[in-house]
Structure formats: structure tokens, C-alpha cells
Amino acid sequence: MQRVIGIVIAASLIASCAEQATTPARPEPPAPPPRAAPAPLPEARRPEAAPSVPVPPPAPAVAQETTYTVKKGDTLARIAKDHNVALRDLAEWNQIKDARRIKIGQQLRLTPP
């Protein structure tokens, strides 16, 4: 008898769990209504149209030098670095075979010939 009661209780527990699993969860909340389009700006607040005239590109901040006069203590490497020029290019443009052989007062070309 106790065995039958235990089986009945177990069966009822299983049945109640199965019923809970098949019942739907909370219903989804309704989606919010769509937003309305913003009101147009009054005439006084509307941005002005861009001018149709093309704008010229900005001028360089500093005019690029084309020559440099060697001063005491200068090295070809430092001159090249200071003027954003590759050392090899600077030596080639000025026909310099040995970078250690520059003289004070010598004019160096800083642009390609």
C-alpha cells in the first residue's frame, strides 16, 4: 500500500512539473510606438547652403628652401635630417662621394636637379 501511495505521489509530482514546463512564460511587452519625424526648422534657424565656389588648397606654411650654405659644425646627415631629405639623395644631388668632405660656405642643393 505504501508503495502504491509513493508511486501516485511521484507520478503527480512529475505531472505537475510537466504542466509547468509547457505553460508559456510571461508575455512579451508590446513594442514602443514609432517616433515621429522632427519638426522642420524655422526659416531663421536653417543652416545656410555651402558656397559653390571651389576652395583652393592651403599654401605651405614655410616656403621650401632649394639650397643650403654649410656652416661650421654641420654634417651632411644633420643637414639632410633637418630638411627632410634622404642622405643618399642629398649626396647624389651635390655629387658628394664622401659625406665627411663638406666645406664651410659650400652651397648644397636640397631639391632634385
Image (cartoon, rainbow, N blue to C red):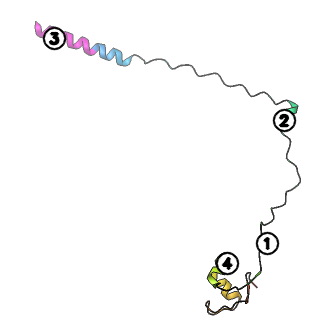
What x and y, as percent, mark residue 40? 81, 29
N-term-proximal mark, 1 vs 3: 3
Cβ atoms under marks 4 and 2 closer than 8 Å:
no
Q: Which residue corresponds to the image point at 85% horizontal and 57% vertical from the top-left?
A: 55
Of pointers 4 and 2, the one earlier in the residue sequence: 2
- Mark pair 4, 3: CA separation: 95 Å
Residue nearer the viewer, 11 or 63 = 63
- Name the secondary structure under disc 3: helix
- Give the mark nearest the N terminus, 3 or 2: 3
Three-letter residue code for mark 2 = Arg
Which residue is painted at 88% across and 51% down in the image?
A: 52
Where is mark 2, residue-wise? Answer: 46
> Disc 4 versus disc 2: distance between alpha carbons?
50 Å
**Which amino acid type corresponds to the residue marked 1 in the rendered image?**
Ala
Query: Disc 3 designates what residue?
Result: 6
Disc 4 target residue: 85
Residue receiving disc 1? 63
**The residue tagged with tag 2: helix, strand or loop?**
loop
